[in-house]
Amino acid sequence: MMNSVRELLAASLLEKFEAALGSFNLANGTSVASALVSAIMIDLRKSRNEDGIEIIDGLDDGVIFDLGDELSHAIYHEHSHFTLPLGTQVEPHQPGSVRIGGEIWVTEAGSPGLFPLEMVRRDAHGPNLELLRDSISQAVRGKPWQRIGLPSPALIVDANARHLLQFPPFQDAGGVVLQRWANEAGASRFGAATPQQIHAFAASIVADMKTLWKRRKAVAAQVAVTRRIAQDTIPDDASGVAVHAIAIDFEHQHRDEQLSFYVEYDGIDEAHRPGIVLDFLPAVLGGRLGPVPHGINGRRVERDALRGLGADGEIEGLAEAVVAHAPEGQQAVLARLGVNLETDVAFVTEAGPVYAVLFWHDGCIKAEITAPGRIAQYADVIEWYGGAYDHASAKALVGSKLTSVVPLPFDAACVISDAAPLCRGSVRLGLKSDRSLVNCTMGRIWEI
């Protein structure tokens, strides 16, 4: 179904469903009518029923209300299963989200409808962030630990993307930054959390604030030692590198006397740009136990060599294919990666959506690709769930081009380097691909 036709149909359904459902809303304020429109459009896509539109148009107000009621229960209750009019199964997932025909769709506070999990923001934002900050403010009003302040979103990337909530440096505790992960609200995404979940999350953060206040002198002493270790870590020839912040997360450590800290350096980040480099110092304060982060004592030679070639960095073959075939165009995607450490790309296919996350890792743009129920890719491995392979037929794939085996919506210059069967005939494929050079400002990719 063409996008323009889909949009007209969705608008028509929304008007009809709003008339039947009125002001019936989900817990986070999303109208049930808009969520049901999303579910019905997925049902149409999944069923491929030629008479689907006629069947949907024939739904009366009573059926529409029952469907909306069942959908709202499935979004928030574990045992609420039902079937959409054209046969697509709906199952619960996590609070604020639902599985429709094997795909996970989530709500977003402040936005109508349902959204694919893979394309929903992972950070703390929107009405739920406002509610969280307001809930914390009310809970700490008049308490000494009110002085710690309020948290704001932060993104720090090392081995993975850390979407955090961080407080301002608290000088009474040595300037330490209190933090929590944004995904701890209890829902599949922060924006999908209910007001009840946000209030509970706020209460747990307030408990951390109280702990920091009560232990502020002991924390300050340990922060001072940690800061000395962190500063001693910086090589003498590392110009521009400095300790940016020292953070603490009470949720992810033992509440004993010795604490663990995260150290944020101003260094060379994963995109070979000036940015935050993360280190972790465990609760053994006699000195460093692990290696020095690469962004502190490395990356300069590699970065300068790439700059000499006119490149910002490198890009792997699978990521290059995603960028080259992205619906919004190569230049638009690379422009986002010229500023951000990660971005999303979505493809619409007859078999269903294909999602890609593009991200910087040690100066190289990489990709992770997902097609719900069909494809899962991570690092140099891709799993394809649509085939029927035994050990012999899987091994016969070695040396083949990836896109000759896995139905991707783009041509990727990747070769299968290893293959092994999985349960139910699916297959796990190891990938090998070359890297190219990339300049995000110019929107160019070229061979090394």
Image (tube, rainbow, N blue to C red):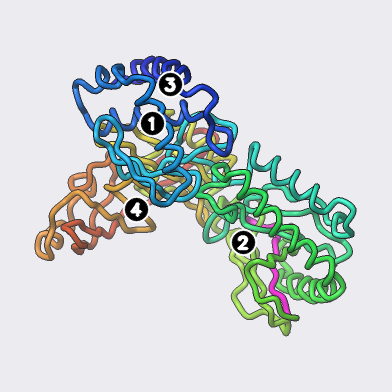
Q: Earlier in the sequence, mark 2 or mark 4?
A: 2
Q: Secondary structure at mark 2?
A: helix
How far separated are the C-alphas under marks 1 and 2? 56 Å
The answer to whether residue 409 is seen in the rendering is: no
Q: Return the residue nearer the eye: 438 or 386.
A: 386
Q: Nearer the viewer, mark 4 or mark 1?
A: 1
Q: Earlier in the sequence, mark 4 or mark 1?
A: 1
- The residue at which mark 1 appears reads as 66
Q: Secondary structure at mark 1?
A: helix
**Residue 272 placement (x, y as % from top left):** 58, 52
Q: Earlier in the sequence, mark 3 or mark 4?
A: 3
> Quick check: 332 above or below 322?
above
Q: Secondary structure at mark 4?
A: strand
Tell me the residue at 23%/52% (across/down).
Answer: 385
- The residue at which mark 3 appears reads as 17
Q: Return the residue nearer the eye: 237 or 384.
A: 384
Q: Earlier in the sequence, mark 1 or mark 2?
A: 1
How far separated are the C-alphas under marks 4 and 1? 38 Å
- The residue at which mark 2 appears reads as 295
> Quick check: 258 above or below 442?
below
